[in-house]
Image (spheres, rainbow, N blue to C red):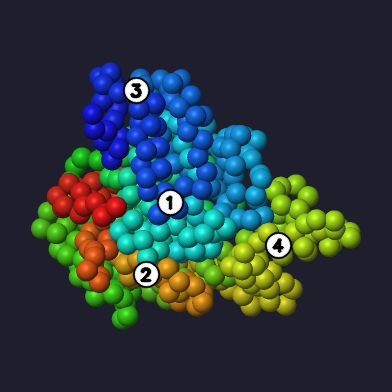
Amino acid sequence: MSLPLESVAALRAQLRAGEIRPRDIVAAIRERVEAHNPALNAYVHTDWDAACAEADRADIALPLGGIPVAIKDVIAVRGQPCTCGSGILQGHRSIYDATVIRKLRGAGAIPAGRVNMDEFAMGSSNENSYYGPCRNPWDTSRAPGGSSGGSAAAVAGGLAVVALGSDTGGSIRQPASFCGCVGLKPTYGRVSRFGLVAFASSLDQIGPLAHNVEDAALILGAISGHDPSDCTSVDRPVPDFAASLEGGVKGLKFGVPKEYFIPGMDPAVERAVRGAIDHLAREGAEIIDISLPHTEYAIASYYIIAPAEASSNLARFDGVRYGHRAKDPADVIDCYARTRREGFGSEVKRRILLGTYVLSSGYYDAYYLRAQKVRTLIRRDFDRAFASCDAILTPTAPSPAFRLGEKLDDPISMYLGDVFTIAVNMAGTCGISVPCGFADEGGGRLPIGLQIIGRPFGESTILRAAHHYERTTPWHRERPPI
Ligand code: GLN
């Protein structure tokens, strides 16, 4: 019997018809992981016995009853390792469930396996991982994107039905684009961050990576909503995202920002995204030109604000409470210094140094405060744009997946790759990446993503648009060669 590991709805139907049991899904995933994880390095921790035991207890009458979900190694699952792809958290296990995990369990889902990521979610290639890079299932010499590279590679490679990732500056959408799956970053405040290890608290959001838009909608519906344990989660009703998928794109007005088609972007990306825009027009959407004039300042201000928040958030990893501790410290300062020197990788150290610098007296006004002002201008760009359109269409990333190692010695060029995703986090709004074509690259094909950006709390609209796009195009049905 074949298991449709690529659709929650199809699995649910088989479960409810009594054709399969939840543990059969876990077993099918395990088989795929054992066959392909040595090449992909997507999972960094698995406990199949525990997952099977949970599967046997799952109530299949619940909305996600018996569906396994791969979890990015930055989200706490009680009793499981939570290492954020870092050496400093080796040996650490979570003592509680993140709110998203509690909600997934409440919907019947099973957290099954922890997936690779850039250390503390800092990076765009998954190369900054203590566990070594995860690899792109379309071409294992290439990056899966980051920081949620493990989530995207697991889904795209058929090693997971769905996965959770986190997105601070593009970390769900860019890997989804690189690996050819769907990735959604919810509006800031839509999903509780309680139990998500903080990178940049004013930007971080948890969201789904999936094979299709419907599955992303189902997971988003399950994890959304106000949480008294996270005062930045917003108390407003959660729509039935899955129910609002139909409706098509007729009557929807999409803005295309001229600042998102820049010299130097890959011609295959431009061709695919322009093709997607034309397709939506033919399907009855209205397309208008818009401008987001402060886009060019988004990267510079993000790479001040995010490291500033990170330098503060990561101060807690000091060898006293969590994970790694340096051996035989002479005194407490020696303990802090050596623990952090030994435990953190170089990108994390770079960000802590940058963040500490821009917050220090004398530089705070010149860097941090100015970056915050730019952030306000970016948000206003989006407010103004959404006065004249329902959603915004852009590429997700300026290129398809690059080769592992290609950008490792050049952090600036790595940062520049975030040019199309970062402003969405700075504005606090939502965005989804869906497959929209391929680039031919050295005999193989590499996926390209279309980003649909929505109004704050406008997830229903971008899901509906993405669903219609998916239903009327072939891209999401393509599978990587593994
Ligand atoms: N690539 C960006 C960074 O390195 C975004 C990461 C993320 O969204 N977590 O900060």
Task: Name above or below for residue 335 compared with residue 195.
Answer: below
Local crowd at mark 1 within 10 Å, few (<14), some, or many (≥20)? Answer: few
Q: Residue at x 44, y 57 (%)?
A: 134
Mark 4 / mark 3, whichever is N-terminal? 3
Image quadrant holding the N terminus, namely: top left
Q: Quadrant of residue 438?
A: bottom left
In the structure shown, which secondary structural element does the residue marked by tag 3 occupy? Answer: loop
Q: Residue at x 44, y 21 (%)?
A: 56
Q: Residue at x 89, y 60 (%)?
A: 330
Task: Name above or below for residue 134 compared with residue 212.
Answer: below
Local crowd at mark 4 within 10 Å, few (<14), some, or many (≥20)? Answer: few
- Say whether marks 1 and 4 touch (CB < 8 Å): no
**Cα distance, mark 3 to mark 1?**
27 Å
Q: How far from the left and from the top, in percent, is residue 403?
A: 38, 70
In the structure shown, which secondary structural element does the residue marked by tag 1 occupy? Answer: helix
Mark 3 / mark 1, whichever is N-terminal? 3
Of the residues shown, which amino acid type is indicated by label 4?
Glu
Q: Residue lying furthest left in this view? A: 282
Task: Name above or below for residue 427 compared with residue 7.
Answer: below
Of the residues shown, which amino acid type is indicated by label 2?
Phe
**Cα distance, mark 1 to mark 4?**
27 Å
Give the residue pinned by disc 1: 38
Q: How far from the left and from the top, in percent, is residue 440?
A: 22, 69
Give the residue pinned by disc 2: 402
Mark 2 / mark 3, whichever is N-terminal? 3
Q: Which callout, 1 or 4, points to the residue nearer the camera?
A: 1
Q: Which mark is residue 342?
A: 4
In the structure shown, which secondary structural element does the residue marked by tag 4 occupy? Answer: helix
Q: Which callout, 1 or 2, points to the residue nearer the camera?
A: 1
Q: How far from the left and from the top, in percent, is residue 375?
A: 51, 66
Give the residue pinned by disc 3: 21
Of the residues shown, which amino acid type is indicated by label 1?
Pro
